[in-house]
Image: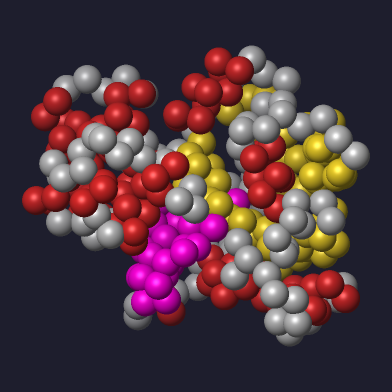
Amino acid sequence: MGVMDMKLAPPDQAEAPLLSVRDLGKMYGERIGCADVSFDLYPGEVLGIVGESGSGKSTLLSCLAGHLQPDQGQVVFQTATGPRDTVTMAEAERRRMARTDWAFVHQNPRDGLRMGVSAGGNVGERLMAIGARHYGDIRAQAIDWLGRVEIRPDRIDDRPRAFSGGMQQRLQIARNLVTGPKLVFMDEPTGGLDVSVQARLLDLLRGLVREMGLSAIIVTHDLAVVRLLADRLMVMKDGHVVEQGLTDQVLDDPQHAYTQLLVSSVLQV
C-alpha cells in the first residue's frame, strides 16, 4: 500500500493538548487580522486552516508561531517542564523554542533556507542550534535526512540555489525536521509548485507526519491538501473561524454558507 493510500491514525485525545489556544486576536489598526480564535491541538494531530486571501489564516499562523505578537489571548504549549503561555514568555525563550520544539516550513523555501550555505550545512545548522558539535555525526545525520526527503547524498555540498523549487522545499523540510520537533507550522508548503511536484511533496509530507507522529498546523488555500494531510479543519473568513470539525465531515457536509462556497469552488481562493 502506498503512502497516499494510508489513513493516519487519529490522535489520542486522552492526552493533554499539545497546544491550547484561547481567544486569540490580532488587529492591524481598525482591521481585524484574527479574532476570538480558540482550539486545542493534540499530540500527533494535524490541523488544517483554510480560507480565501485575507481571511486571517496567515495572521493566525504567524501569531501561533511567535512571528507576530497578538493583541489578546493565550497560546499555551506543553513544554517538557509543563504548560507555558508563549504569548507572555520572553523573546529569547520563544526563539529557543523555535529552534527546538517548533519548526516552520515557509511557502517560499528561500525564506527558510540559507541560500549561500550548502545543503548539508543547512541541515547541520539546525543540529548545531540544539548543541550538536561532532562534525562527523552532523554530516552523517544530514546525509540521512537528505535521503529521507529524496535528495541524493552526493548533493550534500551543493548550495540550495542549484536546486529546483521542489528540491529546495524538500531541503527546507529536512532542515526543520532533523531535530524532531513536537510541532510544525506549515504555510502553503506546496504553493507555487507544479502539480506533479506537489503530489510528490504531499506524499513525502504525509509519510513523515505518520512516521514521526508529528503534530502540525498547515495553512493552505488548497482543499485537496488539507483533505490529504489534516485530521481536523478550521475555516476562516474575515478573521473569524466560521466552521471547524473533522476534515472529511467539514468538506463532505459543510454547514456554513462560506464553507459551502469554498467547497463548491465558487470563491477563487
89 versus 40 height, above or below? above
> Is 193 inside the magenta-drawn segment?
yes
**Count of numbered badges drawn on the protein:** 0
Q: 57 left or right of 105?
A: right
Residue 167 at x, y = what percent?
29, 57
Residue 175 at x, y = what percent?
34, 41
Residue in the foreground of this view, choosing between 33 and 208: 33
> Is 252 inside the magenta-drawn segment?
no
Main SS of the magenta part reads helix
| Residue pictured at 45% horizontal, 29% vertical | 99
Residue in the foreground of this view, choosing between 139 and 58: 58
The reply to whether residue 170 is in sight is no
Which residue, as the protein is rendered here, is positioned at the far right? 30
149 versus 79 height, above or below? below
Q: Which residues are magenta?
A: 188-217
| Residue pictured at 34% horizontal, 31% vertical | 126
Q: Quadrant of residue 206?
A: bottom left
| Residue pictured at 84% horizontal, 31% vertical | 72
Residue in the foreground of this view, choosing between 206 and 265: 265
